[in-house]
Amino acid sequence: MSDPTPGLSIDSDTGVEVSLPVAGPGVRAYAFLVDWHVRTILALAWYIVAALIFNGGFRLRAPLTNDARWFIWVVAPTFVIYFLYHCVLEPVMHGRTPGKRIAGVRIAARDGGVPSAGALLTRNVFRLIDSLPVFYGVGLIATMATRDHLRIGDMAAGTLLVYERADTLAPPPAKRRADYPLDPAGAEIIGELLERWSTLSVEARAQLARRALTRFAAPFPPLATAPQDDDAGLHAQLQSLLRGASIR
Amino acid sequence: MNTSRRQHALTASFMQRADLWREALARSRRLAQGMTEDAGDATRMADDYRLLAHDLARARRLLPDTRTREYLEAAYARAHATLHHGAWRLRAALLALFRDDIPAVVWWLRPYILWSSLILALAAGAGYALVHRYPELIALFASPDLIASVDHGRLWTEGMLNIVPSSVLSVQILTNNIVVSLFAWCAGFFFGLGTLYILGLNGLMLGAILAFVSQHGLRDQFLTFIVAHGCVELSVMCLSGAAGAAVGEALVRPGTAARIESFRVAALRSGKLLAACGPLLIGAGLIEGYVSPNPRFPVSAHVAIGVGYWLFMVLMLSGVLFGRRSWATVR
């Protein structure tokens, strides 16, 4: 059975290795569903707009006679949008699609870099096999059965799907003074608490704030003016602590 | 200074570099998305990569279980991906593909092309013999409409252009052919059996229909219909089958490499040939939609177009059309 948290280890010229977490079947399915909706909506939108323009009124049906212009301007682009969505977007967006972007994943080559256009096209052509017999049955079984959660297209192209955390992780707290003595881990906890402040109930944030102040502010001298212990006061104390205002 | 205080000072000074990391990540994003062509940005990216590697190593020691380390790992991975993404020069890449890579793949696939052509020919012979001996078996290979049309003494292609415009017909045909061609390649994944099945089925159908129309005295008309587009269409079928067979053999006999690695190499290498098959099938589809069913073109024109297009395919696959001088450099 497959390892629940596999990763792609990247060797680099710098000697510092990094491991990219490999995306599993769940996030793959999520990204695919988002993409499926996007391309379906785009294809339908094209069909509706083109049909309305072609028919010159509110009528979406094809003309009764075989009209080449209807086929070329209305039908063919609809199918092109639907079927070439992945083939075009993945090379253009360097291994990403809107669905993959929303799911926080990207296609990576074995060296962690962006796969070549040939590899991305190969990966997409093998959807013909992965989609067999219905609903990506072969691909789904393959992703569940292989260690790196690869579908057949990934095996053929030498690619895998990895989480792209750089777009989803918040950057570390802003620049601080060199004598700032608050532990960065503590600063992160307080920073996150302040970020989540408005989403928490008043009781919950008061409790968390007092706990954080007891843990991180206790070793330092108190503020010049006595802080209030109400909601606004606790918020101000946390902000001061994060800025280093209580430490002199 | 005690150890804890020193550690705090180190981490605090380390955290002062946060703006540099943010800038490095932003630059990496800009370059990856092609939003900048500034040479200075590209040069600084190399410095950023070293900076991020250095700081990541420090973060792993100073702040092992923090979001800062996670952020640096993500930024470093992003920078790595940006730096290791080769420049995408479409025109140069396409020229190299058609001039150098595809002829090399064709040369490599020679035995597979021979075998897949043989299989297609044998299957066509078998289909012909079957229907010649047991005419009722045509129902296995052809649609009721086709059979009814031939039974009435005319090809199903007659008057086709009165029903379907050439453009529509061409797009339908070329789409179908491209899908079959791609499937013949991909189906090599089933240890080559899928490719064998597709080649065999297409050969059987061709032979069976040829026998059926011959029995009704329509052979010459049928050959006139298929000669213009069929020379290239059948050749491309053999080429796709050869590529699929190579994929299948890589799985059956991987050699010293791991099976999955052997499969990957064969798929990526043979897949280049499909880049030539696609345009060739588009051309064949256009001929089949505009020329083949059109009675205004004489037989000689059908033959000339068929042979000419086939020669064009040979020149294209040999790379001569794109400036290659000889096969010597392919081998």
Image (tube, grey):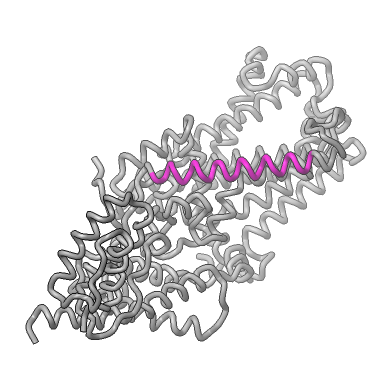
**x, y percent for residue B270:** 50, 53
Q: Is residue B131 magenta?
A: no
- Taking the spot 29% from the left edge, 73% from the top edge, the residue there is A240
- Taking the spot 75% from the left edge, 23% from the top edge, the residue there is B214
- Taking the spot 60% from the left edge, 35% from the top edge, the residue there is B121
- Residue B205 in which image quadrant: top right
Q: Residue furthest right?
A: B296
> Disc count in the image?
0
- Residue A225 in which image quadrant: bottom left
**x, y percent for residue B175:** 67, 41
State whether residue B40 is above or below residue A126.
below
On the question of residue A177 being in view, the answer is yes
Give the prevailing secondary structure in the magenta stretch. Answer: helix
**x, y percent for residue A191:** 31, 66
On the question of residue B289 being in view, the answer is no
B7 vs A33, nearest the viewer: B7
- Residue B237 in which image quadrant: top right
Q: Which residue lies furthest to the left in this view?
A: B2
Q: Is residue A33 magenta?
A: yes
- Taking the spot 26% from the left edge, 56% from the top edge, the residue there is A206
**x, y percent for residue B268:** 47, 55
Classify residue B64 as left or right of residue B3. Answer: right
Q: In what quadrant of the picture does the N terminus of chain B appear?
A: bottom left
Classify residue B242 as left or right of residue A204. Answer: right
State whether residue A221 is above or below residue B243.
below
A207 vs B127, nearest the viewer: A207
B170 vs A67, nearest the viewer: A67
Please provide the residue range marked out in magenta: A27-51
